Image (cartoon, rainbow, N blue to C red):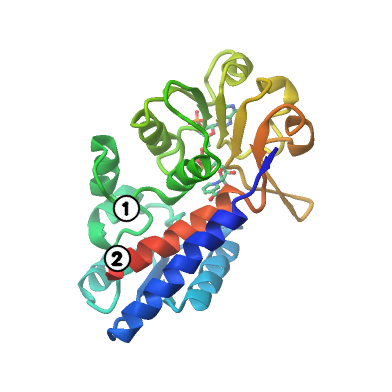
Amino acid sequence: MILSGVELASKIKKEIKERVENLKAKGITPALRCVVSSEDGSTRVYLNSIKRSCDKLGIDFAEVTTDSNNILNDVKTLNEDESVNGIMIMHPVPTGVDEVSVLESLDPFKDVEGRTPQNLGRVLLNVRSFTPCTAQAVMELLEYYNVDLQGANVTIVGRSTTVGKPLSLMMLSKNATITVCHSKTRDLMGKSKQADVLVAAVGRPKMFTADWVKEGATVIDVGINVVNGKVVGDVELDSVSKKASVSKVPGGVGSVTNAILMRNVMKASS
Ligand code: NAP
């Protein structure tokens, strides 16, 4: 079975559109600002997709271009601007800038990506917060497809602060048993193969082939890799989908992540 994120994303966006219209009727236009201090190969693609979603949903979007000398001041100005509801600090920041310090300076109530220490701490405590959008997207995709995490053996490959680490805590709160793997993990294949739910968040194209997956497992592919101009995930869809349920790339976790970001902007405005 192939799991799509498109249906879930459009369901979430339909709800957002209605709520944005209600907010606008009250004279409130949700506003998102992206702080861009440096760019890598994927920055423009990501910004364009966010802008497109904002335009479709009636959310006011703008980039704020800054540099290493001004980034902290610019974030402070956006924190204090009452017309701005959501702020994203685009990754990467320039060399020499401490990204954690920038995130610490961000108002947690405007942190729609769930990256501040306050919001990450709230994930640890399992209390309401802006959760990291991609980790939240994985949780909601699993729920949408009725995948029961209670007692399940979950293997997450990748331990980043935006995906693997928060996701492990969120899944633990749902009573799953979690194994978190990374580049130094021994017998990665064995740990992958034991999983009822396998999450691939590495960034290596088609790393997970059918040999790595248990028959009947659920595989969530978070990876986004560009190979010969084409977007592919970390999972080899054709072989793995013959023995397991697997989310597709594109049109899987990424679509839901984008919808959740939009929902957070709307929530920050309410
Ligand atoms: P990241 O910060 O680069 O983390 C990659 C993780 O993979 C690290 O924990 C690393 O281990 C681990 N790793 C690397 N090579 C490995 C190997 N050979 N075996 C086992 N583990 C290995 O990446 P990220 O930001 O989490 O993103 C991961 C992927 O998800 C990327 O393709 C990214 O584009 C994609 N992504 C998708 C979305 C979405 O919405 N769908 C959102 C964010 C990211 P160490 O910690 O030991 O280095």
The image quadrant in which ligand 1 is located: top right
Badge 2 element: helix
The amino acid pointed to by label 1 is Phe
Q: Is residue 64 left or right of residue 213?
A: left
For label 1, the residue is: 130
Q: Residue furthest left?
A: 80
Give coordinates of residue 89: x percent, y percent.
38, 60
Q: SS at mark 1?
A: loop
Q: Name the residue tied to disc 2.
A: 268
Query: Callout 2, which amino acid?
Result: Ala
From the viewer's perspective, is residue 160 above or below residue 115? above
Question: Mark 2–mark 1 contact, CB under 8 Å?
Answer: yes
Please identify the quadrant where the C terminus is shown. Answer: bottom left
Residue at image location 38% in from the left, 72% down from the top: 19
Pick the front one: 35 or 15 = 15
In the rendered structure, the answer to whether residue 113 lies left or right of residue 245 reads left
Residue 107: x %, y % from top left: 23, 60
Few, some or many residues within 10 Å of mark 2 (<14, 14–19, 20+):
many
